[in-house]
Image (cartoon, rainbow, N blue to C red):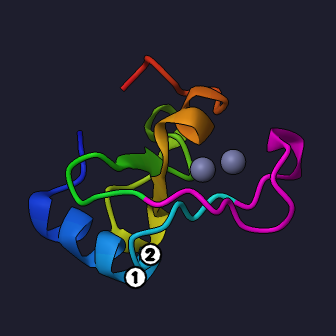
């Protein structure tokens, strides 16, 4: 499953138009400073769907493409 458009809308509003990634391994200190657009943003399952992650807003993380490529699920959803 994928996130619904309404979930993406809410996640994008929550993000304030900025990547929500805080993974230290990516080279950005604290939160990623990259700005994203509603349709350019990546909507990532924090808890992978294959492991039972849901399509709820709380499981949706707004990421920039660069960060999304560094997550393990890149290319698999
Ligand atoms: Zn990012
Ligand atoms: Zn990142």
The numbered mark at residue 15 is: 2
**In the image as oriented, which residue stretches furthest toward the top?**
75
Q: Magenta stretch: dominant SS?
A: loop
User: Residue at the location (43% across, 19% down)?
Assistant: 76
User: Residue at the location (61% across, 40% down)?
Assistant: 67
The foreground one among 5 and 49 is 5
Screen quadrant of the C terminus? top left
* Residue 73 locus on image (x, y percent): 54, 27
Within 10 Å of the Cα at label 1, are there few (<14), some (14-19), or many (20+) other Cα atoms?
some
Q: Is residue 22 left or right of residue 58?
A: right
Instruction: Tell me if residue 46 comes above or below residue 74 in the rendering.
Output: below
User: Residue at the location (35% across, 50% down)?
Assistant: 41
The foreground one among 5 and 42 is 42
Q: Is residue 57 left or right of residue 20?
A: left
1 and 2 marks in contact (CB < 8 Å): yes
The numbered mark at residue 70 is: none
Screen quadrant of the N terminus? top left
| Helix, strand or loop under label 2 | helix
The magenta-colored residue range is 22-35
User: Residue at the location (53% across, 60% down)?
Assistant: 19
The residue wearing badge 1 is 14
* Residue 61 locus on image (x, y percent): 48, 60
């Amino acid at each position: 499953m994928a996130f619904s458009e309404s979930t993406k809308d809410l996640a994008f509003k929550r993000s304030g138009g900025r990547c929500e990634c805080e993974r230290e391994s990516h080279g950005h200190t604290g939160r990623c400073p990259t700005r994203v657009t509603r349709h350019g943003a990546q909507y990532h399952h924090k808890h992978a769907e294959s492991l039972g992650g849901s399509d709820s807003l709380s499981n949706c993380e707004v990421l920039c493409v660069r960060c999304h490529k560094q997550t393990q699920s890149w290319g698999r959803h």
